[in-house]
Amino acid sequence: MLLDNTSEIQDMFVTYPDPLNKKYKIGARIRKKTNTEVKMTRRNGPLKIEVNVPLELELISIPSMLGYGDDLQKQKKLKQSIERLLENRLKKLVEKTQKKFKSEPFYWSLEIRPLFSSVKEYEKWDWTNKNFPFADINVNVDIEIIGFGKQIKEEEMKKVRD
């Protein structure tokens, strides 16, 4: 869904490992900020595809209570950790579609079709069998953290009862 611009995605509720305390996971709401950008370059050799996935992330649960909302260094580390995690997962997915499934489910062919003067020329170029499976694809995730939800400080936890 993150790589496909034809489906409308509202919100996804997800968890990620807390980069500062691996014992905990962070709960978040994530959504696409804008459409995924797909840039293709035809060249001698394999097709080059650059994919940029712009996302907004709102933290809704930080069980480690490490205070990400108050510390820019912690925010930077969290942002980089989640971006790296998502990039790795998306790259693995793309590789699987190229090698195992030999099919492209993201509708990226819509991006390259206008570069051909005719349908016949595009069909001869053969996106599905000759180009997509061998393309050099780079996926970049760009996250903007838009909120930290309600931050409970440790001293306030003493007031909370079950």
Image: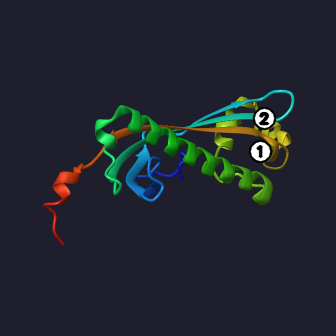
**Residue drawn 46% across and 51% down?**
8
Image: 49 above or below 24: above
Name the residue that disc number 2 marks. Answer: 47
Q: Nearer the viewer, residue 92 or 107?
A: 92
The colour mode here is rainbow
Residue 70: image x %, image y %? 28, 37
- Furthest residue toward bottom: 162
**Residue drawn 18% across and 52% down?**
155
- Position of 37 with respect to 150 (left or right) is right
Quarter assignment of residue 134: top right
Give the number of the disc on residue 114. Answer: none
Image: 62 above or below 37: below
Which label's residue is closer to the chain start, 1 or 2? 2
Residue 42: image x %, image y %? 77, 29
Q: Nearer the viewer, residue 88 or 5?
A: 88
- Position of 108 with respect to 77 (left or right) is right
Residue 41: image x %, image y %? 73, 28
**Residue drawn 79% across and 54% down?**
99
Q: Nearer the viewer, residue 88 or 119?
A: 88
Total marks placed: 2
Quarter assignment of residue 131: top right
**Do the residues bearing badges 1 and 2 touch, measured as CB atoms within 8 Å?**
yes
Name the residue that disc number 1 marks. Answer: 132
User: Crowding near pointer 2: few (<14 within 10 Å), some, many (20+)?
Assistant: some
User: Crowding near pointer 1: few (<14 within 10 Å), some, many (20+)?
Assistant: many
Residue 28: image x %, image y %? 38, 53
- Position of 14 with respect to 130 (left or right) is left
Residue 121 seen in the current view: yes
* CA distance separating discs 1 and 2: 8 Å
**Residue drawn 50% across and 45% down?**
82
Query: Amino acid type of disc 2?
Result: Leu
